[in-house]
Amino acid sequence: MLIAGFDPALVAEAARLVRSDGSEVELAVDRWRHRAGGEDRWLLDHCTGPTLDLGCGPGRLVEALVRRGLPALGVDVSAVAETACRRRRAPMVRADVFAPLPEEGRWGHVLLADGNIGIGGDPLRLLRRAAELVRRGGTVLVETGGRPEEFWRGTARVHTAAVAGAPVPWAAVGARAVTLIAAEAGLRLTRCHTGARSFVELTVGRGRPVTRQ
């Protein structure tokens, strides 16, 4: 059975992403469905104003930001994600990230967590889109691949024990590679975090010295 995109991973007990280069990545489906915690806090702590979560999935980060009293909105194409967000009262719009979105150019922060730098299979296009959505001095917070130099583009399919998702354009980018791409999108590296997961903060316009955390 073949169904749309990432929907199988949003309802399965376990899922893996099978890339067109033959490699496989286990997806953190438990983390997506539960409340934000662990290293999610790095992302949350660096959101101090209105935040847009691109590829929000079930909405755990949006929910957490709202609980902190911050305006937040998720964006996802999935009807399954929309239902999950509604259940947890996480505001979201069902839309493509490249389609018109609310309050473009006024967001303080854009999130690309959980590998969502891969959306569309073109990281430069995606970062340019993210830069359009935030105000000058705003930030794009990106979860990167574990290998700093990694840069891969192709297609990928979600596989579970029961079903396979349709192939979608996808990418995987490490911290060093995403920093180089970001410069072409008018974004500057201002913070980074390396742990079990890796994140970078990219700032629109004039940035500050890089802080490692």
Image (cartoon, rainbow, N blue to C red):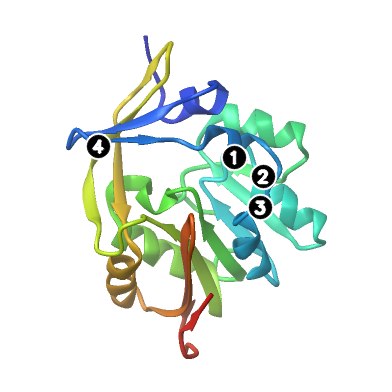
Q: Mark 2 points at which residue?
A: 60
Residue designated by label 3: 73
Q: Name the residue under label 1.
A: 31
Compared across the picture, whether 37 is left or right of 21 comes to right
Residue type, label 1:
Arg
Quadrant location, the N terminus: top left
Query: Where residue 177 sits in the image (x, y, percent)?
Result: 27, 66
Q: Is residue 102 visible?
A: no
Q: Locate residue 16, reporting x and y percent.
A: 39, 29
Q: Residue 155 carries which label?
A: 4
For residue 50, say whether it is visible.
yes
Asked if residue 184 is positioned above or below residue 5 in the image, the reply reads below
- Of mark 1 and mark 2, the one earlier in the sequence is 1
Q: Earlier in the sequence, mark 2 or mark 3?
A: 2
Q: Determine contact: label 1, label 4, CB under 8 Å.
A: no
Q: Is the residue 88 above or below the residue 53 in the image?
A: above
Give the mark toward the camera: 1 or 4: 1
